[in-house]
Image: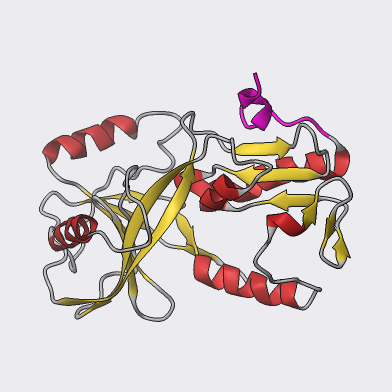
Amino acid sequence: RNYLIEEQISRIFHDENERKLWLKKAQDDNLKDFLATDFEEAGSVVNPFGCGRVNHSCRIDVGGFFSGMSGYLSERNLLKDEFDYTEFKAVTGNYRENVFEKIIFAEGIGVRENPFFRNLPIHPNKGHNFDLQLSTDTEKHIFKKKHFLFRKSDGGYYYGGTYDRFGNGSQTDEKAVEELRKGLEEFYPEEYTVASVNTAYRPTVADRRPILGQHIDHPNLFVFNGLGARGVLNACYFSQHLFDLVDNGEELPMEIDLKRFQG
């Protein structure tokens, strides 16, 4: 199954200055193939200054991908369990009745509870998003103003997400909910229903680089973390780097290696 969905990104301009800035950036050799200079108007949303089209754009069906991956792994001896660090013997690789030659910890902000990697400078960034039902469907575009709006495969819509470096807990923050409502109502003029408010944490790093690598004292332990808000975009690229380290002993680029934090 292909989880890559090719959909146009339509950037809703706030004002005339944004239109001018878009046209200026579209002259850049690195961007001119992606930023269309013929502006469009979308009939389903409020866009008095029009929309800029991003060419060659797409998104990942993230929910479908993880569901499919879970099924794939379940057919191939997947062990699903809540990992208990106290039962793991790092020197031998023993965990309960199993022995593992190598272990990669990909835990997001949960790494802060990991006794082997808890000192890594991972900072949680809380985000909120909406699952929506819209009374009137939009064009099948990925709309972007302050946040993203797009139609999902189940007929509902995703809208989000917020960024909060100081948020904590899994509870919903009313300030973030209000931010989303205001942002949506700026350009969607019809009735809508919030089916659910979802929260999650992005594992971020101050230098905006992921943290990959091998434990300094336990060479059988590895970490894959710190992908922040761009995990969907960059995970495959960086996982190949980690694979090359784990399987082939190839050095990681220093800008993503956990060694950059080890003195």
Q: Is residue 197 left or right of residue 234?
A: left
Q: x and y percent of residue 42 in the render?
A: 21, 62
Q: Residue at x 55, y 42 (%)?
A: 226
Residue in the foreground of this view, choosing between 233 and 55? 233
Residue pictured at 37% horizontal, 57% vertical: 169
> 3 above or below 240?
below
- Please identify the quarter of the rendering in which residue 138 is found: bottom left
> In the rendered view, would you say 209 is above or below 42?
above
Magenta segment includes 171: no
Q: Main secondary structure of the magenta part?
A: loop
Give the quarter of the image for residue 248. top right
Q: Is residue 31 above or below residue 225?
A: above
Q: Position of residue 186 (x, y in %)?
A: 13, 58
Residue depicted at 38% across the width and 61% down the height: 170
Q: Quadrant of the N terminus?
A: bottom right
The image shows residue 44, relative to residue 107, as above or below, that is below
Image quarter where the C terminus lies is top right
